Amino acid sequence: MLNEPLDHQPKQKKDKRNLVYSLFVVLLLGTWAYIIYDKSVTTHSKEQLQTQINAIDSSRAELKLEFNATSARLDSLTGKHIQLIDKLADKNKTIQHLKNTIAGLLQKQNITATQLLEARKMIDELNGKVNDLYNELALLQNKNQALTLANEQLNNEKLQLQDTLNKTVAYNQYVTNEASTLHASNFSIEALKVHNNGKEKMITVAKKTDLLRISFDLDANRIAPSGEKELFICIVSPDGKIITSGNTITTRLDGTIPYTTKVTVQYEQGKTASVNINWRNNGNYEPGDYTIIVYQNGYKIGQGSILLKKSGIFG
């Protein structure tokens, strides 16, 4: 009976030690469980964070592609319509500012989802403004094309009117020249022998002729202005050639021809003027017809003739 207490005390110590061991094991298991759980949570968080980063990068890349496409479209518009874009300078300035803001936002290294959402809104706004710009440019282009066609039509009409005007002016000048050209009539041509004492005698023999007196009238003309008028006299000899010292005139119908002499006369509008010319031949007068043709203003205005005969048996 005395030994029983001694056996009972060691059993109690052993039981306490087992309890401590058990608690230690539980704590160790709990620690490892916590570590494993914490690692699992951390890994999951990292995976979620990586997923978010990948989503942000994907969204950024998608937004950049859309932004680049919109920018390219805008550059194409401004490049093709550089003259028209000047008329929309204020709108283009606003668009360029918005474009620069988006570009700066998308270039950020640590862009957030909120900033991506903001970029998305701004890109949508940019697309809307580019569409509006495209429509306005199309409208301006249509107006310009309409104006260009109208200008071309006006230019064609102007050219036609100018051509008609030129033809009218030319015709009026032609008519005026025609109408203002004088007319010569009542030709009188005399062959004269001039004696030493100055007396003159009308003759018909070529050999005895000293000069030809040519007289004619310039008829009244209500269009020809008053003033000096140049008359060109062509004297055609019996051989059909114009007697000349080498001078020429340009006529309206016969081209350039030689003339014999010219005179300047005073003419009063609407009145008849008499013209008298004494012409001496440098050589001998040949028998035959002499034709006197008068030109004024490039036109032939009249002519007359005289026949000079051969000498008779008695001279």
Image (spheres, grey):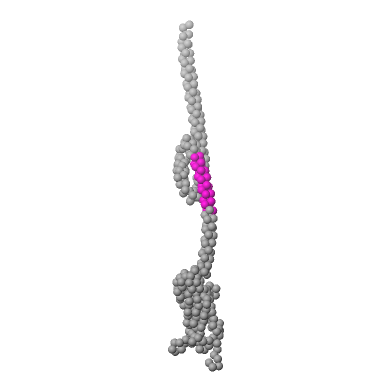
Q: Residue at x 46, y 9 (%)?
A: 5
- Where does the image place residue 274, in percent across and percent down from the top left? 48, 76
- Where does the image place residue 230, in percent across and percent down from the top left? 47, 75
Q: Is residue 78 visible?
A: yes
Count of marks placed on residues: 0
Residue lying at the far top of the rendered structure: 1
Residue lying at the far bottom of the rendered structure: 314
Q: Is residue 295 visible?
A: no
- Where does the image place residue 282, in percent across and percent down from the top left? 48, 85
Q: Residue at x 49, y 82 (%)?
A: 213
Decide which of 309, 56 is in the foreground and name it: 309
**In the depicted structure, whether residue 86 falls above or below residue 19:** below
Task: Specify the segment rendered in magenta.
Answer: 124-149
**In the depicted structure, whether residue 13 falls above or below residue 110:** above
Q: Is residue 254 magenta?
A: no
- Where does the image place residue 93, in percent across and percent down from the top left? 45, 45
Main secondary structure type of the part rendered in magenta? helix
Residue lying at the far left of the rendered structure: 197
**In the depicted structure, whether residue 35 falls above or below residue 117:** above
Decide which of 70, 138 is in the foreground and name it: 138
Q: Does the magenta stretch include residue 136?
A: yes
Decide which of 190, 2 is in the foreground and name it: 190
